[in-house]
Image: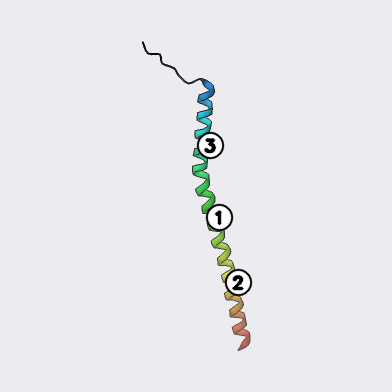
Amino acid sequence: MAQITAPGPVHDDRARTDQITRDRLRTAVPVAVAVALLFGTLWVGALALRDMVDLGVWLLSST
């Protein structure tokens, strides 16, 4: 007769914790990348806007 063994509670808890950690990383990493890209885009946009305003002021003051 074959013997059926079930993993003990320590193994179950460790496997469950590892799975939860992997799931959190799968959701946290793309969110972190998206937020970083958003802030980078806003920062570059602010720099470009500052340069355009500076150029406009220079053009208006030179005429």
Q: Looking at the image, is mark 2 or mark 3 nearer the viewer?
A: 3
Residue at position x 52%, y 21% in the image: 9
| Cα distance in 3D space between marks 1 and 3 | 22 Å
In the displayed image of the protein, which residue is found farthest to the front? 1
Q: Is residue 40 above or below residue 52?
A: above
Residue at position x 55%, y 66% in the image: 45
Q: Is residue 33 above or below residue 47?
A: above
Q: Which mark is residue 36?
A: 1
Which residue in the structure is indicated by mark 3? 21
Residue at position x 56%, y 58% in the image: 39
Q: Which mark is residue 57?
A: none
- The quadrant of the image that shows the C terminus is bottom right
| Cα distance in 3D space between marks 2 and 3 | 43 Å
Q: Which mark is residue 50?
A: 2
Regarding mark 2 in the picture, which secondary structure is present there?
A: helix
The mark total stands at 3
User: Residue 28: horizontal and vertical position, in percent?
Assistant: 53, 45
